[in-house]
Image (cartoon, helix red, strand yellow):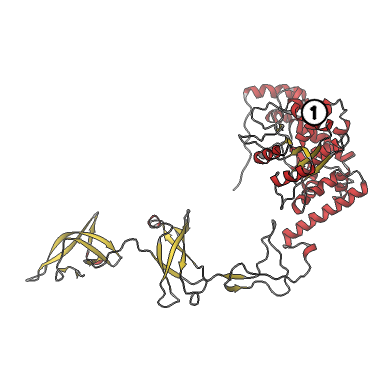
């Protein structure tokens, strides 16, 4: 399959805009058309596109609930309440937590941060974590890059007297959590000019509003735009509007005076002596931050990003690199270098049965199943008391079957075998076999002799849809079928030649060889062309 871009011609209105832009950018005529296709509608917009300025960032108070969020944050700090900064374990979440925690730490000490572990706590927030926060005396949680769908959990937090400020960029459900404030540019009815912010970007807007409300110069906050740029690139949000501005200044920061933790990662990535690009962030810096959340806990990534010591940051970055390399090894080889040592482990089967296969050899390395690897199969064991028949049925007959129907199973390799079974599943979708649509049917055997049966035997299933005993029957070969009618030829005389009379009959159940005769009644001595009636 191949694909290509379809470039639509400009509309008459767009052509007028393109002409105006072309006058300003005559040295490169194609640029004006591309600008129009990108949504640039004026020379002023084009100037902003080519010359991003921090003054073009939108007023953070244009975002619904921003004033509520700032008021609650100021009240918490004034009352010396404990604040917890909470975020997802991916790049967007960890950079968001690092930015908000590090910035607020300049003004407030009773603050901490928390990143859930990927495999133990999982995505988002849980009631157990909230219970733990309540035990710590937390009164306000700023949750970043998640929380927009945590309705039950935030209701549980309110019972403990814990308020939430949600900073998220995921599409909300119809029912919203009972948070003090919900900062999300994708909220229904939101008129915020840039709906494409990353989770870290929403956190930056909250800190921007906090600084404005308290009359704080934003120089230090603007110095954290490298974290926002990393989140924008790693989370693949559209790099337009203020995302483009923040990415521009964040990238400049990465190349001149980056965050201490990012500086260590840059050194580890061998990017110190070259210009760092967005591609470098996506494919080199971002994955090393992500490795922490995927291997262990994203908290380690935040520890790195909030570090204020060069040597400490470098050591943490080396640890992040080691984790990333371990992750690669697991994906590639199935086992990490750290866990490749030999050990004596007792392996027990979850069922009692017959060992079918032991695919590993003595001395081979084996691992448990994890996110990146299915694990090593050390043995295949069959529970012979729980046998399953799998067969195929033609599409013309599948409607005659139903789950729970009794069937008889005969195994060719076992003489005289006749086992009862019950249909457990009929495949909802057909498979094409040599131009014929068939459906897989599974039936569970009941009371089978496990001593005689072996896994993998071929077998036939017989389904009795109708049954008739002790009835008059005719060979199918003597019956003439015409449309919906059936006929036989009854012998009337033999001399001088045999003469037969065509007689209409009604038939019943057929087993493929004989068919039940419902009417008329024939005497046992009645002779038919081709055979005779029999009982």
* Residue 479 percent coordinates (x, y): 22, 63
Hey, which quadrant is residue 5 in on the image? top right
In the picture, which quadrant includes the C terminus?
Answer: bottom left
Q: Residue at x 62, y 32 (%)?
A: 8
Residue holding disc 1: 209
- Asked whether 222 or 61 is in front, the reply is 61
- Asked whether 404 or 500 is in front, the reply is 404
* Residue 30 percent coordinates (x, y): 72, 30
Badge 1 density bin: few <14, some 14–19, many ≥20, Cα 10 Å: many
- Asked whether 437 or 189 is in front, the reply is 189
The answer to whether residue 285 is left or right of residue 497 is right
Q: Residue at x 48, y 77 (%)?
A: 452
The answer to whether residue 479 is left or right of residue 362 is left
Q: Can residue 438 be seen in the rendering of this structure?
A: yes
The answer to whether residue 134 is left or right of residue 433 is right
- Asked whether 440 or 99 is in front, the reply is 99
* Residue 58 percent coordinates (x, y): 77, 26
Q: Can residue 26 be seen in the rendering of this structure?
A: no
* Residue 81 percent coordinates (x, y): 81, 35
Hey, which quadrant is residue 26 in on the image? top right
């Amino acid at each position: 399959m191949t694909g290509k871009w379809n470039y639509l011609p400009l509309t008459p209105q767009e052509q007028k805009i393109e002409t105006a832009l072309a006058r300003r950018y005559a040295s490169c005529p194609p640029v004006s058309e591309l600008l129009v296709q990108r949504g640039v509608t004026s020379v002023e917009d084009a100037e902003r596109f080519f010359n991003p300025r921090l003054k073009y960032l939108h007023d953070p108070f244009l975002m619904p609930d921003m004033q509520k969020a700032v008021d609650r944050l100021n009240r918490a700090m004034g009352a010396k309440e404990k604040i917890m900064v909470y975020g997802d374990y991916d790049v967007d979440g960890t950079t968001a937590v690092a930015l908000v925690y590090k910035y607020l730490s300049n003004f407030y000490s009773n603050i901490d941060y928390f990143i859930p572990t990927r495999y133990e706590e999982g995505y988002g927030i849980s009631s157990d974590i909230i219970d733990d926060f309540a035990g710590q005396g937390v009164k306000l949680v700023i949750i970043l890059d998640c929380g927009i769908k945590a309705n039950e959990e935030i209701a549980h937090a309110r019972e403990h007297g814990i308020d939430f400020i949600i900073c998220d960029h995921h599409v909300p459900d119809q029912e919203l959590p009972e948070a003090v404030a919900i900062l999300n540019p994708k909220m229904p009815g939101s008129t915020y000019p840039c709906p494409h912010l990353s989770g870290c970007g929403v956190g930056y807007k909250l800190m921007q509003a906090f600084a404005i409300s308290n009359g704080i110069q934003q120089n230090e906050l603007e110095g954290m735009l490298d974290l926002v740029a990393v989140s924008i690139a790693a989370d693949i949000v559209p790099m337009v509007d203020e995302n483009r501005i923040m990415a521009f200044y964040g990238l400049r920061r990465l190349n001149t005076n980056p965050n201490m933790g990012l500086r260590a990662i840059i050194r580890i990535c061998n990017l110190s002596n070259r210009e760092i690009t967005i591609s470098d962030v996506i494919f080199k810096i971002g994955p090393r931050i992500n490795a922490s959340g995927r291997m262990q806990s994203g908290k380690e990534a935040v520890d790195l990003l909030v570090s204020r010591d060069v040597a400490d940051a470098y050591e943490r970055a080396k640890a992040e690199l080691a984790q990333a390399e371990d992750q690669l090894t697991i994906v590639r080889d199935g086992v990490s270098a750290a866990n490749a040592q030999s050990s004596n482990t007792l392996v027990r089967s979850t069922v009692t049965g017959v060992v079918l296969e032991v695919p590993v050899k003595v001395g081979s390395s084996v691992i448990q199943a994890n996110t990146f690897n299915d694990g090593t199969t050390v043995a295949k064991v069959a529970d012979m008391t729980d046998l399953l028949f799998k067969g195929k049925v033609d599409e013309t007959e599948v409607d005659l079957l139903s789950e729970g129907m009794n069937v008889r199973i005969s195994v060719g390799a076992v003489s005289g075998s006749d086992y009862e079974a019950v249909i457990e599943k009929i495949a909802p979708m057909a498979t094409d076999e040599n131009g014929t649509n068939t459906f897989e049917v599974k039936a569970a055997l009941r009371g089978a002799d496990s001593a005689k049966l072996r896994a993998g035997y071929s077998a036939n299933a017989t389904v009795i849809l109708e049954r008739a005993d002790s009835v008059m029957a005719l060979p199918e070969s003597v019956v003439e079928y015409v449309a919906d009618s059936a006929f036989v030829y009854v012998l009337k005389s033999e001399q001088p030649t045999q003469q037969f009379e065509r007689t209409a009959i009604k038939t019943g159940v057929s087993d493929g060889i004989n068919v039940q005769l419902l009417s008329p009644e024939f005497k046992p001595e009645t002779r038919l062309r081709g055979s005779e009636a029999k009982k």
